[in-house]
């Protein structure tokens, strides 16, 4: 096969018009299930405080008729908790020329980059909120940090917490040093079982919580589906036969003896852990909600800042639970 002499082709042609799509395709995930599900509040200081309490255990409470010796019961005081608001921000600076040039896929280069940074900060917040990080007061050289969810799960008294350690014989009530501290590492992970999930839900029920979701990494989400075995695997076909059969091999909603849970895959969840969330008892509190500020102009460019100052409030961490030290296989 040959091309005739002097046939003009595109390979050396001058003046070809560029075919560049006017759409920018971005695959980066933007889901933030915990940030979206938790409540939203406001605070007035970088250090914010709240109190938690619980009722005495139920008792038969039978009393003598005519008794005049009614001794006062011991008083249980509320627990006072604190956290710090941390600052998260990103800046974008664009030259006047770059902002004036007609780029494909966006009207304004500055506005496009600012929109990207806003989404990135939300992901940063999700990662921080789901962390095992300690709170940090901060100083002139050290940034303040808000404690993540794992800091508020568990209790210092052994056997009384809502943290389940995965093992051949799951350990209920793993000790946490203190509320507001980071949970220690839990050694070699064990394979997740349905018994561990049931134990966590039973613990929440006993303590008064009603989790609605389990947040899990992709691998542990798949493991939960696999735990259903033949109960999950199914073939569905339409009655009319007009639609193709659908194979179902996933658990998205799990019904346990102690409540119904939605299984939510999270890209920012800690590895080797399931988080059982009762959103009624969590809120992200803002000292400064999301805002955009145009910074001082120092030349032929525009510089803008998107910023938020916020902290996590665990209204009562015992309403939620965690299964830690687990893996999919």
Image (cartoon, helix red, strand yellow):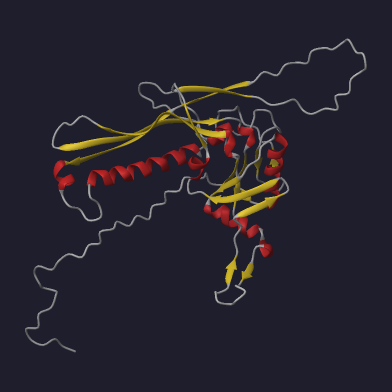
Residue 314 in the image: state x and y as whole percent.
56, 31
Note whether 178 is above or below 250 in the view shown. above
Q: Quadrant of residue 227?
A: bottom right
Q: Quadrant of residue 93?
A: top left
Report the quarter where the N terminus lies: bottom left
Q: Quadrant of residue 71?
A: top right
Count of marks placed on residues:
0
Q: In this view, which residue lies farthest toward the left?
A: 6
Judging depth in this view, the residue of 261 and 327 nearest the camera is 261
Note whether 45 is above or below 223 in the view shown. above
Q: Residue at x 64, y 66 (%)?
A: 233
Q: Residue at x 9, y 80 (%)?
A: 8
From the viewer's perspective, tell me whether residue 78 is left or right of residue 181. right
Q: Residue at x 15, y 49 (%)?
A: 101
Report the quarter where the C terminus lies: bottom right
Q: In this view, which residue lies farthest toward the bottom?
A: 1
Judging depth in this view, the residue of 156 and 243 nearest the camera is 243
Q: Residue at x 66, y 49 (%)?
A: 260
From the viewer's perspective, tell me whether residue 108 is left or right of residue 147. left
Q: In this view, which residue lies farthest toward the top?
A: 68
Q: Is residue 135 visible?
A: yes
Residue 66 in the image: state x and y as whole percent.
92, 13
From the viewer's perspective, tell me whether residue 109 is left or right of residue 158. left
Note whether 159 is above or below 31 in the view shown. above
Residue 262 in the image: state x and y as whole percent.
60, 50
Q: Is residue 329 visible?
A: no
Q: In this view, which residue lies farthest toward the front?
A: 240
Residue 147 in the image: state x and y as whole percent.
50, 31
């Amino acid at each position: 096969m040959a091309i005739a002499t002097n046939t003009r082709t595109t390979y050396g042609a001058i003046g070809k018009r560029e075919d560049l799509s006017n759409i920018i395709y971005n695959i980066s995930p933007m889901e933030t299930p915990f940030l979206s599900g938790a409540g939203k509040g406001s605070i007035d200081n970088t250090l914010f405080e709240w109190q938690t309490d619980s009722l005495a255990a139920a008792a038969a409470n039978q009393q003598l008729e005519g008794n005049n010796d009614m001794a006062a019961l011991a008083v249980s005081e509320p627990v006072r908790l604190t956290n710090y608001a941390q600052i998260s921000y990103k800046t974008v600076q664009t030259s006047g020329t770059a902002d004036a040039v007609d780029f494909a896929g966006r009207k304004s280069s500055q506005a496009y980059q600012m929109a990207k940074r806003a989404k990135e900060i939300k992901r940063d917040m999700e990662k921080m909120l789901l962390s095992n990080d300690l709170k940090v007061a901060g100083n002139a050289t050290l940034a303040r940090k808000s404690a993540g969810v794992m800091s508020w799960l568990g209790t210092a008294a052994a056997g009384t917490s809502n943290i389940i350690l995965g093992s051949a014989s799951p350990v209920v009530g793993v000790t946490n040093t203190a509320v507001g501290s980071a949970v220690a590492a839990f050694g070699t992970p064990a394979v997740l079982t349905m018994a561990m999930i049931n134990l966590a839900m039973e613990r929440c029920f006993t303590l008064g919580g009603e989790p609605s979701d389990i947040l899990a990494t992709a691998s542990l989400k798949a493991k939960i589906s696999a735990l259903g075995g033949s109960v999950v695997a199914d073939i569905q076909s339409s009655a009319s036969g007009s639609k193709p059969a659908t194979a179902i091999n996933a658990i998205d909603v799990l019904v346990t003896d102690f409540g119904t849970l939605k299984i939510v895959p999270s890209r920012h969840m800690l590895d080797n852990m399931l988080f059982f969330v009762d959103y009624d008892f969590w809120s992200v509190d803002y000292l400064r909600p999301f805002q955009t500020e145009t910074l001082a102009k120092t030349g032929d460019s525009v510089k803008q800042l998107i910023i938020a100052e916020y902290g996590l409030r665990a209204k009562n961490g015992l309403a939620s639970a965690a299964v830690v030290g687990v893996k999919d296989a």
